[in-house]
């Protein structure tokens, strides 16, 4: 299986000004924006870390997920949540020839932790021997920072602050306990090896 992020969060969607306020950085000076690229990098790093620990995409992005077999014939859980759309489902044969599957033959099951693609007729399209399935999908709480739940947004600010204040590497490893407690309810609990629950 391979998951590829096809789009990234645009800089305009990042809350750099809010993060500056959170850090209580001075304003009204000629060089107010000098640190903006640095702050943006810390925000991106914190967002990536929170997404990796929770399996939740904070700001909407597009992905392509390639797999060689369905976990169940009728249903396949997606690797990230919350998913807002299945954009394209392709089946590739062993030579790489792609067949786009009609959207009426599958549907998205929306779920905060384990969204899934379901076969509308009781089964998903057959993946041929040595072939693959490619699912293009969109995941995220929304396109704007204001769509991110407040506790996750605060976790990003706290983690980005930790990175900013320990940029010389003296702060140690790991995630602060305050961040861990804020993201705990968003973490996936996997049972049955990620199969049907």
Image (cartoon, rainbow, N blue to C red):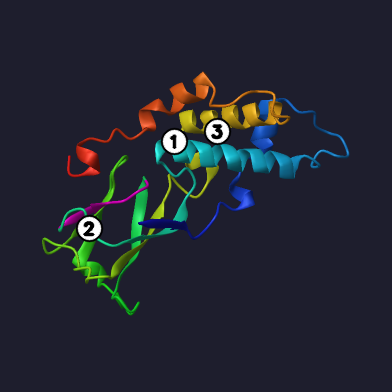
Check disc 1 and report its element: helix, strand or loop: helix
Closer to the camera in the image, 106 or 187 = 187
Marks 1/2 in contact by CB < 8 Å: the verdict is no
Q: How many marks?
A: 3
Q: Is residue 91 left or right of residue 56?
A: left
| Number of other residues with Cα within 10 Å of mark 1, as a class: few under 14, some 14 to 19, many 20 or more | some
Which residue is located at x 36 percent, y 52 percent? 84
- Residue 174 in the image, given as x and y percentages of width and height: 54, 27
Magenta span of residues: 74-80
Task: Write down the residue under mark 1.
Answer: 53
Q: Which mark is residue 38?
A: none
In the image, residue 172 lies in the stretch drawn in magenta: no
- Residue 3 in the image, given as x and y percentages of width and height: 41, 56
- Residue 148 in the image, given as x and y percentages of width and height: 47, 39
| Number of other residues with Cα within 10 Å of mark 2, as a class: few under 14, some 14 to 19, many 20 or more | some
Task: Write down the residue under mark 3.
Answer: 156
Q: Is residue 118 left or right of residue 65?
A: left
Is 151 rendered above or below residue 98? above
Which circle, 3 or 1, is nearer the viewer?
1
| Number of other residues with Cα within 10 Å of mark 3, as a class: few under 14, some 14 to 19, many 20 or more | many
Whether residue 148 appears in this view of the structure is no
Check disc 2 and report its element: helix, strand or loop: loop
**What residue occupies the far top of the structure in this picture?**
177
Check disc 3 and report its element: helix, strand or loop: helix
Quadrant occupied by the C terminus:
top left
Specify which label sits upstream in the sequence, 1 or 2. Answer: 1
Q: Is residue 106 left or right of residue 64?
A: left
Question: What's the distance in space between the residues labelled 2 and 3, CA to CA?
Answer: 34 Å
Task: Write down the residue under mark 2.
Answer: 70
């Amino acid at each position: 299986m391979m998951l590829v992020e096809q789009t990234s969060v645009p800089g305009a969607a990042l809350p750099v000004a809010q993060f500056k306020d959170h850090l209580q950085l001075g304003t009204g000076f000629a060089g107010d924006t000098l640190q903006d690229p640095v702050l943006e990098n810390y925000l991106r790093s914190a967002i990536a870390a929170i997404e990796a620990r929770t399996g939740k995409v904070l700001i909407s992005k597009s992905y392509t997920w390639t797999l060689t077999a369905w976990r169940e014939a009728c249903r396949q859980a997606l690797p990230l949540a919350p998913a807002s759309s299945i954009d394209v489902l392709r089946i590739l044969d062993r030579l790489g020839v792609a067949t786009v599957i009609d959207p009426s033959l599958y549907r998205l099951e929306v779920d905060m932790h384990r969204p899934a693609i379901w076969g509308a007729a009781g089964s998903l399209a057959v993946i041929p021997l040595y072939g693959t399935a490619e699912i293009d999908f969109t995941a995220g709480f929304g396109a704007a920072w204001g769509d991110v739940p407040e506790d996750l947004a605060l976790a990003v600010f706290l983690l980005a602050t930790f990175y900013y204040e320990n940029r010389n590497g003296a702060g140690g490893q790991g995630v602060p306990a305050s961040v861990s407690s804020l993201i705990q309810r968003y973490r996936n609990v996997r049972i049955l090896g990620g199969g049907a629950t």
